[in-house]
Amino acid sequence: MKNADFEGVVDTSDEWIVQRTGIRQRHIASEGETTADLAEKAARAAMKDAGVTASDLDLIILATSTPNYTFPATAVEVQHRLGMKHGAAFDTQAVCSGFVFALTTADQFIRTGQARRILVIGAETFSRILDWTDRTTCVLFGDGAGAVIVEASEGVGSSDDRGVLTCHLRSDGAHREKLYVDGGPSTTQTVGCLRMEGKEVFRHAVGMITDVIEDAYAATGLGSDDLDWFVPHQANKRIIDASAKKLGIAPEKVVITVDIHGNTSAASIPLALAVASKDGRLKPGDLVLLEAMGGGFTWGSVLLRW
Ligand code: ACO
């Protein structure tokens, strides 16, 4: 769906959307297409790319705020579709930080030896929870899914090791009202629509993002100059640019996909990784910094070697 396709839907313009957000288009799931459908496609693509089958996996973690059903977890549906009868599958919910929370969880399972190979998916159909009469939100979001496979391997314990080097998660429920969905099983018994005070989210975003990135630098002794790629959550190009500038990350190291995907919440980072991996930018051994901030508020960073 291009910006121009909003003509006749809400009072907006391509110029306003591009200028304020960097978004030019977003994808909308077709009628009847669900989060599990998108997640399954991303999962199969990641498994093919990694050369693994369902029997090689022992855990699936799926980050989403737009599950197929209130329960069971969408991850369990994906597990079934992949023909996986062993192991376990569960969802995580941290809105736009969902993938960072899921990857951090996967890292803990790997480090403690509880799992050796994990499928981590970010999948969303935000189009289903948008108020399509509210121009301040409906132009911002899109649907999509991305996935990665995380595998245990022995390293030497230095920042030259490949894999996840450090993870830093934060949340603060005091900001709940600034970005939330106004429905739920225990309150309204409805699904609800996304509500956002965009200016307020923007005001907090850069500070929160840079805080957790500085935590990652402090934990590893690495810094912006050491990065090969910065793959941030794709909410708004202005937030990404301001964060990169504050941290001294060179613009050519920033992977931007918000222009083609819009904000796909938990799916945005794995989608951006897929784009940068496919076009040859991401290479084995590259130092990659992920970050996200979203509803809750939740925020976090993951520093990894690809
Ligand atoms: N088209 C045209 N005009 C619009 C639109 C639109 N789609 N939306 C709002 N406007 C108008 C407003 O009504 C306002 O008009 P007014 O001055 O007459 O009142 C004017 O544009 C400016 O609105 P602002 O809200 O001040 O615009 P701002 O520059 O702050 O940009 C935006 C809005 C893009 C939402 C920005 O605040 C933002 O990106 N915030 C962060 C959002 C975000 O990242 N959310 C995702 C977090 S992740 C998650 O967990 C889901």
Image (cartoon, rainbow, N blue to C red):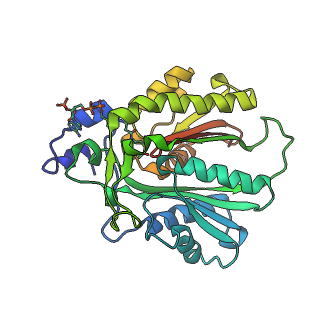
Residue at the image point whose x is 39% and y is 32% from the top: 202
Q: Quadrant of the C terminus?
A: top right
Across and down, in percent, residue 217 comes to: 68, 28
- The residue furthest right is 156
Residue at the image point whose x is 55% and y is 28% from the top: 210
In the image, is residue 104 above or below residue 67?
A: above
Across and down, in percent, residue 144 comes to: 43, 56
Across and down, in percent, residue 83 comes to: 61, 78
**Is residue 142 toward the left or the right of residue 244 in the image?**
left
In the image, is residue 168 above or below residue 152?
A: above
Q: Looking at the picture, tell me which residue is in the foreground, 160 or 181.
A: 181
Q: Looking at the picture, tell me which residue is in the foreground, 274 or 280.
A: 274
- The residue furthest left is 8
Residue at the image point whose x is 52% and y is 32% from the top: 208
Q: Quadrant of ligand 1?
A: top left
Q: Quadrant of residue 236?
A: top left
Disc tally is 0
In the image, is residue 288 above or below residue 243?
A: below
**Is residue 94 toward the left or the right of residue 285 in the image?**
left
Q: Quadrant of residue 137?
A: top left
Regarding residue 133, the answer to whether it shows in the image is yes
Residue at the image point whose x is 71% and y is 27% from the top: 218
Regarding residue 281, the answer to whether it shows in the image is no
Across and down, in percent, residue 124 comes to: 43, 58
Q: Quadrant of residue 79?
A: bottom right
